[in-house]
Amino acid sequence: MSKNICMLGICGAGMAPLAIYLAKKGDAVYGWDDYINLPIKDLLVSNGIVFMPERVLPPNCDYVVRSSAVNEHVDAICQHAAKDGIETFRRGEFLAKICRDKKLLAIVGSHGKTSVSGACVEILRHNGLVFDYVVGGFFKGNEIPPSAYNEKSEWIVAEVDESDGTIESFSPECTIALNYDDDHICNYGNRDNFLKTFKRLFARTKSTIFVPEDDIIFTNIASNFEKKYVKIQGLNGDDFSEKNKLIALFCVRKIFNKDIVLPHKITGIQRRSDVMFKTEKFVFLNDYAHHPTEINSLLRYARTRYKDYELNIIFQPHRLSRTKQYFAEFAANLDMFDRPFVVELYAAFEEKIEGVSSDLVFNEIKNPNKKFLTLSQFEAGMHDVYNGLSSYDKKQLVMFVGAGNILYHAKAFINKITFEEVEKAFKQTQIKFASFKDLTHTFSIKVPTSVRIHVNPTTRNELISIVNICRNLGIRYVIIGNGTKILPPDGMINAVVITLDSDHWKTLKWIGKDTLCCMAGISLRDFCKSVSGKGFLGTEKLSYIPSHIGGAILMNAGAHGQTISDHLVSIEILGTDGVIHTIEKADLSFGYRTASIPRNSIILSATFRFSEQAPQEYFTPMAEELLNWRKTHQPRGINFGSVFKNGDDFCAGELIDRAGLKGTRIGGAAISNEHANFIINQGNASFRDIEKLIDLARYVVYVKFGKFLETEVNILRA
């Protein structure tokens, strides 16, 4: 039976995958976070999770699940839940609760849990086995979801975290115990208590305990359970990513007793030696390492993978307690890099400890090349570092390392130098572009926004060059069409924005009597006018949709019973491989506001074929009728048309109206009094005003009617 679950701190790397798992299982999941990670929010919403507009307990709540970073004694929702007799769980406790009905493959240990969990998932998926999983992170590329539910599965793969004591709630079928380090001991009182926790977990493990032979402490504990203990052997070398893959393969083969084969490539988990930007001289990567042992593993990995590079580390200590315990070990490891840089400590949710800061680590470092970087001036400081490293003859590996907010600051710096490289490449290939261009009036919603780089290619070859430059440099690019169904961010779009507005993209050509080929940038109005001008039926009701052909196909635009795909024959796309492909309609699928266009491809042109005709006298009154309908049914003012898609059994506007939200205003944005599925910019609306209204409408409709509203509007992040 489905439950209503409120999740606090839902954007965390452990909470978000659990939330997605529960939603896939059929539970109604509501989320709140003080620090919303916007890409994670978008992922959660795409999985049917509803964000709460206020910090209040949702109605009919069955459980509250909180991140360990949320203090239940001071949190308003937790206090309300306690008053109403609603059970509150920490994330690990609730994960243990849902694992009780499955055979749990638990991955535990101080380091590498997420990577090994992810490798197990990829191997099992590749071999076609049915299983559930909840990983405490996100796969690179986001092609693999961070969790999955299958009602027919017998097994669930999950990492079990020892940091907050919730490890005591788990009773696995099999346990992979990776390694032991004296991390998080403060939560257990002393080392002996910490070791007893793992001993109890091994005792509760029903079938098999796997331990790498090189971990002496876990090996000693597991030897007390001789009948269950299996030693993982043959793990040599300094490449920890290779070691994690081999551990996963060994254990999966033993557990499932099948001819398990390794995928050609393991995708891996984000923030594990991710390359952020690469040039002939530089490689910039980021890694989640936040313990001295992990720093040492990263150093050995870098020496193996980047033999010809000098090694630079920009390290952010994570947690006050860990820094106090290990500052000397951190310094000893940082000393072994060519140039160590230290930034301000990230305390997480810990209370201040007198005398503990990044200075403890920095002052202990003996390396004369050490330097301290402040977060408030991080970009400027990193530019000085970058310019200094550029003067050296040897190639440079620069690693941003830590579990705090170092990645946020690193991305800002990398964005800056990457865009500088894009501009250089555009100039070299004579591509015209504009930097820091105001695009407010490009979007129909008129939210004040600009773009870091804007290009308007005049030919196919120029578009291909633009896309290839962006892909080679790892910079994001966005096609915006005519900007009607897009909510742009306030301030700056940190991307290369491409518009297909030159004459080349606005052409169409009739081939024979009944076939029309048109470029992606032609307006739907001009397209429909050409079709009706030839006397063909099938598009006349689409003429008032404000879209280009490319965007119309991408969302299968439709009105009054007609859709753009009705007479489609084929499309041309620029694929992610940089090659132009023709795709026949038979190889695509279309639905209500959806089309199975290959992800990240760009529609270049489309071919249509028509048969049924009508006399010209039919089209003029039809156009007048549609115009009158539009005037009487759709509100005027600055908007982007319908915000939410209709469902199979409901009309989005009707539900928002019945929820009493017509006229609701946040800042400069309001839900229209004329049509509840329209949001009006009343002159000074911000991105956040509009997004808050979207969240509010989705939440209230979900609470009142149990219907999840999916947006037609594409929310474009900065």
Image (cartoon, helix red, strand yellow):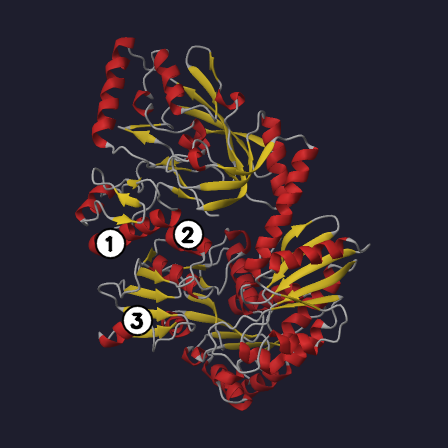
Q: Quadrant of residue 559?
A: top left
Give the residue pinned by disc 2: 42
Residue 707 appears left or right of 458: left
In terms of sequence position, does the residue under pointer 1 or pointer 3 come before the other? 3
Q: In the image, what residue occupies the spot 57% across and 58% down?
A: 409
In terms of sequence position, does the residue under pointer 2 or pointer 3 come before the other? 2
What kind of element bears circle 2? helix
Q: In the image, what residue occupies the spot 75% across and 76% down?
A: 366
Give the residue pinned by disc 1: 700
Q: Quadrant of residue 683?
A: top left
How many other residues sit within 10 Å of disc 2, few (<14), some (14-19) or many (≥20)? few
Label number found at residue 324? none
How many other residues sit within 10 Å of disc 3, few (<14), some (14-19) or many (≥20)? some
Give the x, y percent position of residue 10. Answer: 40, 63
CA–CA distance in space, label 2 to label 3: 25 Å
How many other residues sit within 10 Å of disc 1, few (<14), some (14-19) or many (≥20)? many
The nearer-to-camera label among 1 and 3 is: 3
Give the x, y percent position of residue 84. Answer: 22, 74
Q: Is residue 7 above or below residue 523?
A: below
Give the residue pinned by disc 3: 76
* Total marks in image: 3
